[in-house]
Image: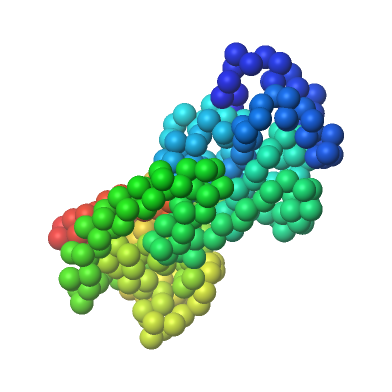
Amino acid sequence: MRSLNPSNQQRRLALKQLAGIAGASMLAPWATAATGKGKQRIISVGGAITEIIFALNASNDLVAVDTTSNFPESVQKLPNVGYARALSAEGVLALAPTQIIASEDAGPPAVIRQLSSSGIPLAVLPAHHKFEGVLDRIRQIGELTGTHAQAATLMQGLQQEWTKVRTPIEQRKSKMPKAVFILAHAPNQIMVAGRETAAHAVLEYAGASNALTAANGGNGFSGYKPLTPEAMIAAQPDIILVTDQGLKASGGIESVLKLPGVEQTPAGRKRRVLSQEAMLMLGFGPRLPIAISQLDSAISRAMQA
């Protein structure tokens, strides 16, 4: 990724020279000189965190993001600190941040401990796979970035949008189709989502039930587990949901339909495979109402076909 400020040659050169250096105390004087009094240098780890920062018009304070940060498109001009779950303390600290804001998925734990003990403020924000968690993230990021008024306005607008999206879904709750979310970003790791996952929450928000937990009296397993033909056939889902990235990695709809047990389900027989961009669907950021509205419409169309 290219720098957000390509005209600032001096800063780019300094970042290259400091790459791999972990000593935060050595970087602090340089950071103060480069940014000026009152200017923050924020590193965002987590696509939803980054989206909120942009939505609050605080993106000018961003100096780097992680690879899950792909929206809005302009974020791709920023330096990148790598995958959220596989961070390097040295790489993060080399960018001389004055604030690190990360999602609960950031890691590994040892690196998070290193960053926490570096003296640089680190905020790890959970979402709890709930809409209320999105609002809480916005409030906290508003406090961290000094955009309290913008945060209040964004929260109010999202609440209104959420009510508009969810009201008709709640009214037809008795007609929930059964769905299974398949995580297939790697050919040798085909997983399905159980309880306490973002995918499970999204299915329920969009007016579907998780077929893998419904088949077990509403309990079932938590987290992700490998896809087995027995579990898929027992679940008998009406809908198969995947991410756009997973659909591409799998080789398209035909390949998804050939996954273990899928052909022996209503979803497989009627070719009801739906997909959505991963961060939009699972990120639990400010686009959550949009994601749920789109999924609700897609599920309704699929069930009528």
At 18% from the left edge and 64% from the top edge, which residue is drawn?
168
At 80% from the left edge and 40% from the top edge, which residue is drawn?
24
Horizontal and vertical percent position of residue 145: 54, 43
Quarter assignment of residue 20: top right
Q: In which quarter of the image is the N terminus?
A: top right
> Is residue 235 positioned above or below 163 on the image?
below
Q: 142 or 245, which is in the foreground? A: 142
Q: Can residue 302 be seen in this view?
A: no
Q: Is residue 113 visible?
A: yes
Horizontal and vertical percent position of residue 177: 26, 70
Quarter assignment of residue 68: top right
Q: 67 or 244, which is in the foreground? A: 67
> Is residue 184 positioned above or below 215 on the image?
above
At 17% from the left edge and 71% from the top edge, which residue is drawn?
171
> Is residue 68 positioned above or below 21 on the image?
below
At 36% from the left edge and 79% from the top edge, which residue is drawn?
214
The image's colour scheme reads rainbow
Q: 274 or 261, which is in the foreground? A: 274
Horizontal and vertical percent position of residue 99: 65, 43
240 sits left or right of 195 in the view: left
Q: In which quarter of the image is the C terminus?
A: bottom left
Question: Given the current orientation, which residue lies at the most extreme bottom position?
Answer: 217
